[in-house]
C-alpha cells in the first residue's frame, strides 16, 4: 500500500468497511510512519515537564535529553514550588479524590472557591468547572445549542468546539474573516432560535489572535451571542495575563468565556464563565458536568497558580523574552513563522512528508517539536509547531536555532532557498 500522502483522517469512518479491516489498515499506516521515524506521537518522557526532557525515543533503549518545545506549560507553573506545595497541602487536608459528581455529594469548598476565583479573574459573575477544557467547550455547546439553533464557527476553532456543535446547525467562516462572518450573520437572521458565534482567543496552530472586540460588536449587532475559548491566552497575553480578552478590553463584550487550567496554570480542568442564570442552568442541565465526578483537591494548585499570575508577573516577562528571541532568530534565518502573536510559534513548511522529516531530524538533534499536518491544518499548510516556556534559556533556544539552520541545508525550507 502507498501511504505517502495518507493522513489519520483517511481511517475515520471508512464507508462500507468493517471495523477490524479499518483498524488493521490503520495499524499498517502507523507502522509505515514508525519505520520511517515519522511517528513522533506519544513519545515517552521519563522526566518532568520542563525546558529539557529525557525522552525514550522509539527503538532506543537509552533516553535522549532534548530541548522541549511541545508543552503548553507556558509559565512553567506545573513545576513551581509554591504551586506544588499548595497541591500537597490540598491533598493532605482533603485526600486524593472528591468521591462523587457535583450534584450528589462531590461539590467541595475548593470547587466553589475555584469557580469564584476564575470568574472574578475574568470579571464575570459565575463559573462552572469541567473535567477538561475540551469538555468545557463540547459539553456547554451541546447543552445550549440544538437543531433550531445555529453555531457560527471560525474555521480554525479547536476540535472540541466542532464536537460541541454536532447536534446543532453549523456555519463556518474563513479564519478571522469579518466580512464573511457578517454575511453569515445577515443570512441567519430570523432563521434560527439562538445564534452563537464561537471563536478562540489564540488559535492553537498559527498562534495568531482573534479581533475579539470587532467580532463581538458584529455578532451583537445581528442579535447573536459570542463565545470565546482563550485556552492559550490565559496567563500569557495581556498586561495582567487575562488573555486576548484583556488585550482587546472585551470583558463586557464576551457573553461566554471558556478555557482550561491545563496550559499556563499547570494543572488540568476546564471552565465556563458567564451570566449567573446561564451558568446555573449548565450546573443542573449539562450532562458531562452533572454525571461526572468533580476534580481532585489538586485544585489547590490552581488556586495558587491564579494568584501567581498576578503576584509573579516576571514569568510572563521571561516567557515573552523567549518568544521574541526565538521568533527573531527564526525570522532572520529566513523561516516563515506566519502571524503568531502568542507563545505558539509555527515554522511553516507546507509539504507533509518534508514536515515529518523535519520533525525527525530535529528530534535526532535533541530538539523536540510537533509536526502538525492535515487534518489539524489544511493539506498544503503542514508545519513544525513550537510552544515556548518561561523557563527556556537563551542557550537552549540557540541550540534550537542551530538545529533549524542545519535541517534547512537538507530540506531547503527557508527563504535562502526560495524567495
Ligand atoms: N481549546 C483549545 C484552543 C485548545 O488548544 C485545547 C487544548 N489542546 C483545548 C481547548 C482543550 O483543553 P484541555 O487540554 O484542557 O482539554
Image: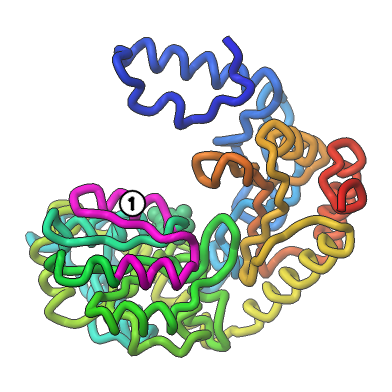
Residue at 78 percent across and 64 percent down: it is 326
- Residue 391, percent from left and from top: 70, 66
Relative depth, front residue between 301 and 376: 376
Position of 306 with respect to 96 (left or right) is: right
Relative depth, front residue between 120 and 190: 190
Position of 84 with respect to 109 (left or right) is: right
Give the position of the N terminus as an image quadrant: top right
Q: Mark 1 points at which residue?
A: 162
Q: In this picture, is 268 found above or below 241?
A: above
Q: In which quarter of the image is residue 171?
A: bottom left
Position of 207 with respect to 405 (left or right) is: left
Residue at 65 percent across and 51 percent down: it is 385
- Residue 59, percent from left and from top: 69, 21
SS at mark 1 in the image = helix
Residue at 64 percent across and 58 percent down: it is 387
Relative depth, front residue between 333 and 49: 333
- Residue 238, percent from left and from top: 55, 84
What range of the chain is rendered magenta?
A: 157-185
Q: Quadrant of residue 193?
A: bottom left
Q: Is residue 365 rendered magenta in the image? A: no
Does residue 84 appear in this view? Answer: no
Relative depth, front residue between 93 and 359: 359
User: Mark 1 packing: few (<14 Cα in 10 Å), some, or many (20+)?
Assistant: some
Q: In this picture, is 229 found above or below 167?
A: below
- Residue 181, percent from left and from top: 39, 68
The quadrant of the rendered image in which ligand 1 is seen is bottom left
Number of numbered discs visible in the structure rendering: 1
Q: Is residue 159 rendered magenta in the image? A: yes
Amino acid at each position: 500500500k502507498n501511504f505517502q500522502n495518507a493522513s489519520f483522517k483517511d481511517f475515520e469512518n471508512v464507508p462500507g468497511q468493517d471495523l477490524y479491516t479499518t483498524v488493521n489498515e490503520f495499524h499498517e499506516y502507523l507502522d509505515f510512519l514508525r519505520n520511517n521515524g515519522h511517528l513522533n506521537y506519544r513519545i515517552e518522557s521519563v522526566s518532568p515537564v520542563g525546558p529539557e526532557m529525557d525522552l525514550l525515543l522509539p527503538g532506543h533503549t537509552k533516553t535522549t535529553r532534548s530541548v522541549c518545545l511541545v508543552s503548553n506549560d507556558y509559565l512553567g507553573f506545573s513545576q513551581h514550588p509554591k504551586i506544588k506545595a499548595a497541591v500537597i497541602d490540598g491533598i493532605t487536608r482533603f485526600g486524593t479524590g472528591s468521591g462523587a459528581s457535583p450534584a450528589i455529594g462531590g461539590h467541595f469548598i475548593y470547587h466553589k472557591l475555584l469557580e469564584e476565583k476564575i470568574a472574578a479573574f475574568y470579571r464575570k459573575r459565575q463559573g462552572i468547572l469541567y473535567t477538561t477544557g475540551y469538555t468545557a467547550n463540547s459539553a456547554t455547546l451541546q447543552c445550549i445549542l440544538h437543531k433550531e439553533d445555529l453555531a457560527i464557527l471560525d474555521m480554525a476553532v479547536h476540535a472540541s468546539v466542532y464536537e460541541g456543535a454536532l447536534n446543532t446547525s453549523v456555519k463556518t467562516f474563513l479564519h478571522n474573516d469579518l466580512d464573511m462572518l457578517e454575511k453569515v450573520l445577515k443570512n441567519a437572521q430570523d432563521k434560527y432560535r439562538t445564534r452563537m458565534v464561537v471563536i478562540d482567543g489564540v488559535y492553537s496552530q498559527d498562534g495568531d489572535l482573534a479581533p475579539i472586540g470587532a467580532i463581538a460588536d458584529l455578532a451583537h449587532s445581528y442579535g447573536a451571542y459570542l463565545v470565546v475559548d482563550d485556552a492559550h491566552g490565559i496567563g500569557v497575553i495581556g498586561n495582567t495575563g487575562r488573555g486576548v480578552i484583556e488585550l482587546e478590553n472585551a470583558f463586557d463584550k464576551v457573553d461566554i468565556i471558556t478555557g482550561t487550567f491545563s496550559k499556563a496554570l499547570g494543572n488540568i480542568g476546564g471552565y465556563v464563565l458567564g451570566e449567573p442564570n446561564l451558568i446555573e442552568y449548565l450546573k443542573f442541565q449539562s450532562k458531562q458536568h452533572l454525571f461526572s465526578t468533580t476534580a481532585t483537591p489538586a485544585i489547590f494548585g490552581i488556586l495558587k497558580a491564579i494568584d501567581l499570575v498576578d503576584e509573579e508577573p516576571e514569568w510572563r516577562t521571561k516567557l515573552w523574552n523567549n518568544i521574541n528571541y526565538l521568533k527573531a532568530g527564526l525570522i532572520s534565518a529566513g523561516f516563515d513563522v506566519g502571524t503568531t502573536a502568542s507563545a505558539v510559534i509555527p515554522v511553516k513548511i507546507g509539504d507533509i512528508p518534508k514536515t515529518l522529516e523535519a520533525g525527525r531530524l530535529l528530534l535526532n538533534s535533541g530538539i523536540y517539536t510537533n509536526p502538525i499536518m492535515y487534518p489539524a491544518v489544511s493539506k498544503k499548510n503542514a508545519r513544525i509547531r513550537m510552544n515556548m516556556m518561561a523557563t527556556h534559556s537563551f542557550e537552549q533556544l540557540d541550540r534550537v536555532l542551530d538545529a533549524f539552520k542545519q535541517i534547512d541545508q537538507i530540506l531547503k525550507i527557508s527563504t535562502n532557498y526560495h524567495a
